[in-house]
Each structure stands twice: as C-alpha cells, then as structure tokens.
Image (cartoon, grey):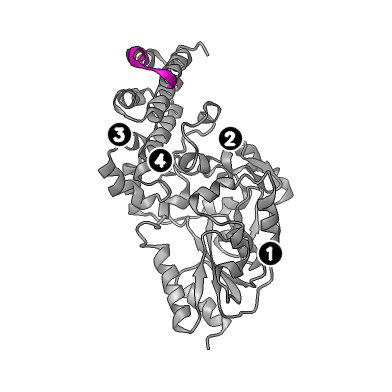
Amino acid sequence: MIAKNDVIDKARELGFDDIGFTGVEPFDSQLAYLDNENAHYDWTGTLGLTLRESTDPLKVMENGKSIIVLLHGYFTKKVPHSLSANYGRCYLTDDRVTKDGLALRIKAFRNYLRDNGIDSKLSKSMPDKLAAARAGVGTFGKNCLLFASRAVRGSSWISPVVMVVDREFEPDSPSVKTGCPDWCRSACVAACPTRALAGNGKIDSTRCISYLTYHGDGLTPLELREPMGMYIYGCDRCQNVCPRNQAWISSDHHHDVMLDDMAEKFSARKILSMDREYFVTHIWPRMFYMSPADMWRWKMNAARALGNSLDPDSIPDLARALNNEEDERVKCMSAWALGRIGGQGAVAELEKYLPVARGNLRTEIESAIKMASGII
C-alpha cells in the first residue's frame, strides 16, 4: 500500500508545483457564500456547474475519504507583450481541447493512484480555492484569487486541481486565511477598471473582465467598453499590480516558441477578420470557453480592443467589419471602436454606412460619429 509520501513524490515527479491533503467535510462556508443574494454566481448554472451540490465532496464521490489538491503553475514562460496585453496568462496554456499538457499529467497522476488501488474523481464544480487552502497549499488574496503557500514564490499564477479519493490520508494543516500585506493598500481593488472587486475578498463576477469577455450576455454595455481596455479574453490586471506577484513576474522565465506563434495568430486584427476554419484551426484549440458558435463574441472583443488601442491604422479593419460582418453585435462594436479612435477617417467610414443602418446599429453609429467628432 502506498504511503502519503509516495503520492507526494509522484506529484513532484510529474511536475506539479505542490500537493496537499484535506478531509471530505462539507465546505459549509462556501455554501453560505453561494446562498448570499450578493454572490452573483447564478449564471454558472447555465454552464452545467453544480456549485452548491459540489460543496459536499461526498456528492462528488459517495465513498470519498480524502481530498488531494495538486498545484499547477501556469506562468512559467516568457509571454510576448502582445499576448499579455490582450489575454489572461492562464489561458495561454489551456489544453482542455487539445489535452496535450496539464491534462496528460493529471491523467498520469490518477493512473498512478488507480494502479495502487485508489479511485479518484474530479469535479469542475468543487470549491477548488477553498479546498487548496484547507489542504495548506494556498492562501487567499483580496483579489479573490489563490496564492501559493510554498510554490512559485508565493504568487497567484497557479491553478488548483482538486480530486476526491477513496483512501484516507492524514490531512495537512490548513491555511484558510487572507495572506495580503497591510501595506499593499488593496492595489488590486483600486486597479480593477470595471469595479468588479469590492474589497474584503468579495467580487461581483458578472463585472469581471474575464467573465465579460467570454460569458457576458450580448453586446458589451457601453459603460464597460472603455474600462475593459485591450483585453480580448481574460484579464490579469489585479494580478499584475499585486505586490505578492512581483517576485515571480520579475523571474527569468524561459522563451517559448509556441507563445511567439500565438502572438502572431491571436492578434486583434486577425481575430476580427477570421473565418470559421481559422478559428477552429488556430484559436479554439487554445481557448476553451467559446465554441465556434460564439465566434461573434471573439470578433466583438477584438473590435473593442482595436478601438481602445486608439490606433488609426485599425480604421480599415474596423470599417471592413462594419460593412461585411453578419452579426449585429460585431457591427455595433466596430462602429463604437471607430468612434473611439476618432478623426476624419473614422467619421467618413461611419457616415458611409449610416444610410443603410437600422435600429440599434444606427443608434450606435450616430453616437460613434458624435464621439469621433469630439461632440461627446
């Protein structure tokens, strides 16, 4: 029978940055949080997430005896600025479609447990951050993220992998606490441009840029377009300014040719003009949340980012989208982006399309012309 240290050694051998153990007691505090009317997590039900039910590990695995938490550090390579400016770093190594990275290591770890008589079960709905803190491998931040207790220089560039197993292991000492220094003055809260962070570890997830870029409902609200800035998919603002992350950000990370290739293929202009074949070949395999049916959202986000770039060279790309894209949400955002960039060239393109515009699109174009002309 394998011992706890054997499991730890295997996790290290497979490249996980840390591992911790805890019991299968219900996560009552998480359930109480979800039941609070200000939790703003009702939208998760549409994605098939059973957040409330999964606060009881025995609902995940009826004969569960322990929880194992593996930590995966995802920010290990140099990220080109053009990627980090537009994309959250955790998505740059997302292999939930290709299953050629982290998924292989998780599979190898679970196979090791199985070969030694231990069954395991994963659940995408379990409170992974709370499980990690209860297992002693992380503490909480004011930005509502998990920070490593021992790995990756105590930073938040980590993803916890939580599994219930049918073997009892001695639990580790919990680290359920907020580990932010008093002197940080809540830099993350101040830096959140959409005011999603409320302080004291609370967040309105529906205002988070990450949520807005891949789960937001329809055309992005006008008041959030400029604050969302250059992000096309995900956001790292609260992590970039965090004092607890500076040691890892300044580390000498290795070069990665794959990220160079992504920087070229994932540019906002290419996203805005892509067809379905381009999306399925280059984009979707690396960015999980939006399927081909949601290509409009990618294009809408790219148009907004181009508008916020204030780069006049983007005007032809946005004008083509305004004229040629079929989805009205993409057209509306392209119009807004032209207005945001402003100038005579943008006004000319907007006025050229105005006569055939109707409804919401016409309203967006009229407003964009005023913005581009400096009237509003």
Q: Residues within 10 Å of mark 2 (few under 14, many from 20)?
A: some
Alpha carbon of mark 1 to alpha carbon of mark 2: how far?
Answer: 30 Å
Alpha carbon of mark 3 to alpha carbon of mark 4: how far?
Answer: 18 Å
The structure residue drawn at horizontal position 62% and vertical position 44%, both measured from the top left corner, is 40
First in sequence: mark 3 or mark 4?
4
Alpha carbon of mark 1 to alpha carbon of mark 4: how far?
Answer: 36 Å
Q: Residues within 10 Å of mark 1 (few under 14, many from 20)?
A: some
Alpha carbon of mark 2 to alpha carbon of mark 4: how far?
Answer: 20 Å
Q: Over which residues does the magenta segment extend?
A: 349-360
Between 78 and 285, which is closer to the camera in this rendering?
A: 285
Residue type for callout 2: Pro
Circle 2 sits on which residue? Answer: 193
Mark linked to residue 82: 4
Q: Secondary structure at mark 4?
A: helix
Give left or right: position of 187 versus 331. right
Q: Position of residue 136 (x, y in %)?
A: 65, 67
